[in-house]
Structures are given as structure tokens and as C-alpha cells.
Amino acid sequence: MWGGRFERGPAEIMEEINASIAFDQRLYAQDIAASKAHARMLATRQIISQADADAISAGLDRIKGEIDQGSFTFSRSLEDIHMNVESRLKELVGEAAGRLHTARSRNDQVATDFRLWVRDEIDNLDRALAAFQKALVAQAAKHTDTIMPGFTHLQIAQPVTFGHHLLAYVEMAARDRARFAAARVRANENPLGAAALAGTSFPVDRKQTTKDLGFAEPMRNSLDAVSARDFALEFLGAAAICATNLSRLADEIVLWCSPGFRFVRLTDAYTTGSSIMPQKRNPDAAELVRAKCARVTGALVTLLGVMKGLPLTYAKDMQEDKEAVFDGADSLALSVAAMTGMVEDLEADKTAMRRAAGEGFSTATDLADWLVRALKKPFREAHHITGRIVAMAEARGSKLEDLSLKELQSVEPGITAEALKVLSLDAAVASRTSFGGTAPENVKAQVKYWQEQLK
Ligand code: ARG
């Protein structure tokens, strides 16, 4: 393709390090779509004949079919997807194929293909994340008043509802989707027509290819168009954050499945057995989602490293963008799908959750709040009194709600029988009615809100 002034072929090792066809063949559909748009535009602007454009377009359709069916032979000596397609086009349509690359370079071509690919991937991920949210909301709807311990420092803090806990992840996924949507806006600009780096002397119509490929605008600066990869960085940034959010739920599922918790049970569909310990039911999928987060983050760090300090415009370094983006995207897509499956699959153990919520004096804050409300104590003093009551319960090995009124009054004589009522888990949860709080009535309203949003 560029051999005019070369006398000999590349060294074997040169070919190996230079070729990207092993991974960039994933761009074939985008490459062919962009080439068809380019050929159409060249014909409209009478840069090539309509007959050549038609031959090119038909040849490209045929190549697409061959690759779809797996009958296309990729060749490493042809380096990348762009040259593999063009070389086959030459076999199919002859001389016309050589006119396709008029007013174009692989630099704007690869930038265009890659933007189209990232845009498609964002659309796929958005659908997958919506399905994940729906699975969470469906579980939350079943557990608007299922009591579980809420944790801080992984210490039992205050009782909450399981539905409320699950909806926290729905909120996170909503922000993930918004981050991808924002990344999509900036990916969706058209670099085609920037040619190698400086633009072209041919009278191209960049608005036409922009419209044809569904981009929002042609990129304004040709140097920027061929050298920008921040769209891919943004995509990986959103992906890394999303994978990080998923890893937190994955870790909770691992904890919840463990004998110390037993909050949820996964069926055979999402667990594996042990080859030596017959009693085991391991949450492998959750563990793998937890670990895949590292790969997605690694992909982001890889591309940040590739781009750092890279002078304008295109440099071959940038060929290293693709494997990072593909691996990050694949790892995330698999993680979202696995999490959706696990959320649909899991069954909550209400008894175990309630039992755990009753431990650790989780309603102590409610007693302190009561002292503030009923006895007009300053919160700090109420906190102190409650602390002494907790110490007393701890010393006797009993729960807060099992202390008698007399015992409570031995610490604070003003306490009345009314105080006993706030010590129950149900009362504690039901009282948290502030907007965003865990009261079942709030959670029911939030489930409705999300069911509406996700319709
Ligand atoms: N395979 C190359 C890449 O992924 C395509 C662009 C090649 N451009 C060039 N000037 N050698 O970056």
C-alpha cells in the first residue's frame, strides 16, 4: 500500500510489532461504514466518478458479508483492518479500489472508525446498565420493608431496609449511565476529512460524511481530529468508575453469601462447588467482577500512559489505544451482565438479616434522638447518656430493647415507658422518613420512581 519507495519488505519482527490486524479487525463494520460514506461523498463532490463509487460500495458490502460469515482471510502482512479491507477491495473491483483513499489517510480513518466503535459500545453498555437497574429495582420492590443492618466501617450502625440498600446501586448506575452519555457527546464528532493531519486540497464535504455517519459535527481542527484520544480516555474513565461501583456490590455479595452473614443465597446458576469440600457454594462470579474492575482500571491507566507527553499529531504509539479499550469494554460488559444475573438470582434471607440488625445496639441513635426530643437534652449529652446505657447492656449481655425501664432510669431518671418504643428495629426504620431516608414508605416511593424512570 505504501511500498513505492521501499525495496525490501519488513523484518519478521518489524511485521510482528507493527501489525494490529489481530485486534483491530473488530473495527471492520465501522471501517466499512466509514469508507462507504467517504466514497459517496467523493462522488457527490465529483472527486471520483459515480460508477467508481458504486463499485466501491458494492465491493465493501461484499467484504462485510465475508467478514460477517468468517470466510475473509486476514493477513498480518497487510498490517491493519484498513489495508486488509482495501486490498480485498482491489481484488474485487480492480482500479476503482485505488480511488477510495483519495482525500483520506489512515490517520483520520482510524480515528473515525474508533469513534464509531466507542459510540456503539456506549449504546450497548447503556442498555446493559438499564437492565441491571431494572433487576435491582425488581429485588428492591420485594424488600421495601425487609430489615437489615446498615454498616459504617463494616460495623453495624443503624437498621435499614434491604430495598433501600439495593436502590443505592440503582443511583450509582444512573450516574454511570450519565457519565457514558457525556462521553458519547464528545466521541460523536467527525474527524474524517482531516486526512493525514493538515486537511486536504480536494473539495470534500465534511458535513455530508458527518450526517451520513450520524456524527453531530465535523471536528474543527484537523490536527486535533487525528491526534485526539481523550474520547477513548473518557470512555475508559467512565468504564473504570462503573466497574469500581460494580465491584462494591460484588464484594457485598461475597460477604452476604459467607457464613458470617448469610444475608443472601445464590442458586446453582451463579455459584460453583469445590472439588474437595462438598459443602461449599462459592460466589465465583461476584469474585470475578470484583477482580475485573482492576483490568478496567488498568486499561485506563494504560491509555493515559500511552497518551502522556505524545506530541501532535498521530504517532504509532496510538495504535496501542485499541487493545486497552477493547479489553476494558469487554471486561465491563461481562461484569454488568454477570451482576444483572446475580441480582436476579439472589434470594434474601430475611431472618438472618433481621437477626444481624438486632445486634450491635443498632437502635442506640434512636434512644439518643428520643432524649433530645422528649427530654430536650442537647444531642451531645443524649449521646453520652445513651453510651452509658449501651455499656450497661453490653455488661449484662443483653440487647437494648431487653433492658427494663428501671434499668434505663438508673442512668437517666427522666426516661419514661415511651422511650422503650423507639428501641425496636421496625420503629427505628419506620421513623427515618426524611427525604432519601430508609423508611419503608420512602423506599416504596423510590421503587415507584425508578419503575417509572426505567419504563
Ligand atoms: N493501525 C493504525 C492505528 O491503529 C492505523 C493508522 C496508521 N497510520 C499511520 N500513519 N501509520 O493507529
Image (cartoon, rainbow, N blue to C red):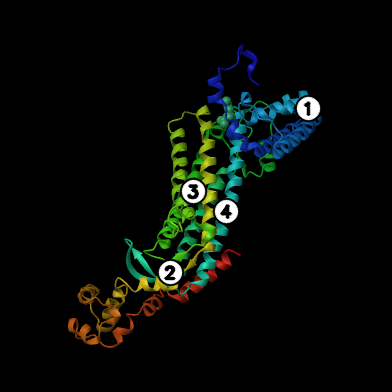
Q: Residues within 10 Å of mark 1 (few under 14, many from 20)?
A: some
Say which element carries label 3: helix
Residue at which label 4 appears: 126
| Quadrant of image for the N terminus | top right
Q: What percent of the width, then of the height, locates residue 122? A: 57, 48
Q: Residue at x 47, y 53 (%)?
A: 284
Q: What amino acid is labelled 4 in the image?
A: Asp
Q: CA distance from mark 4 to mark 2?
A: 25 Å
**Label 4 near ligand 1 (CB < 8 Å):** no
Outermost residue, top side: 7
Of the numbered discs 2 and 3, the one sitting upstream in the chain is: 3
Residue at which label 1 appears: 93
Q: Nearer the viewer, mark 4 or mark 2?
A: 4
In the rendered view, tell whether residue 113 sits above or below residue 316: below
Of the numbered discs 4 and 3, the one sitting upstream in the chain is: 4
**Label 3 near ligand 1 (CB < 8 Å):** no
Q: CA distance from mark 4 to mark 3?
A: 12 Å
Residue at which label 2 appears: 436
Say which element carries label 2: loop
Q: Residues within 10 Å of mark 4 (few under 14, many from 20)?
A: many
Q: What amino acid is labelled 3 in the image?
A: Ala
Say which element carries label 4: helix
Residue at which label 3 appears: 238
Of the numbered discs 1 and 2, the one sitting upstream in the chain is: 1
| Quadrant of image for the C terminus | bottom right
